[in-house]
Amino acid sequence: MERDRIKSFTDRFMVDGRLTTIPRREKDREAMRLYFAAKFDENTSYTEEEVNSILLEFYSDYAYLRRELIDHGLMKRTAAGDFYHLSRG
């Protein structure tokens, strides 16, 4: 089911591997967040610059995408804010 939602998201909102627009519907934004979270390795810590660089490959407003991942619990950052990692579970 989750795979189908992500596929639907990429079919409708991605062109040549780039996000064309932020989805309006929450269901589609959730699929977007799952898609971008999958671009990170769960056993790796990333600096903010590394996170930005990865997300910039897909959309110019990488800060928006990073905030979406953080605000919705898919990614966490250390208390000092210097490292990011995928949330467990």
Image (tube, rainbow, N blue to C red):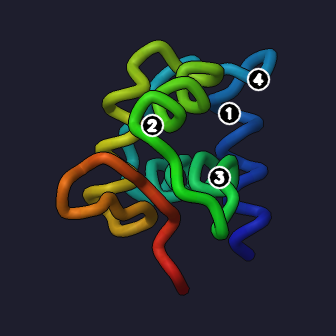
Q: Secondary structure at mark 4?
A: loop
Mark sitting earlier along the chain (4/1): 1
| SS type, badge 3 | loop
Left/right of residue 26 with respect to residue 28 in the rendered view: left
Query: Which residue has dot 4 on it?
Result: 17
Q: Earlier in the sequence, mark 3 or mark 2?
A: 2
Evaluate if marks 4 and 3 touch, with contact meaning CB atoms under 8 Å apart: no
Q: Quadrant of residue 71?
A: bottom left
Mark 1 to mark 3 CA distance (whole Å):
22 Å
Amino acid type of the residue that numbered disc 2 sits on in the rendered structure: Pro
At x 39% / y 52%, what residue is drawn? Answer: 83
Q: Is residue 78 above or below residue 69?
A: below
Residues at marks 4 and 1, CA–CA distance in whole angstroms? 12 Å
User: Could you classify mark 4 by the number of other residues whose Cα lies within 10 Å: few (under 14), some (14-19), or many (20 or more)?
Assistant: few
Residue with the mark numbered 2: 23
Is tag 1's residue or tag 2's residue first in the polypeptide sequence?
1
Mark whose residue sits in front, 1 or 3: 3
Q: Which residue is mark 3?
A: 40
- Earlier sequence position, callout 2 versus callout 4: 4
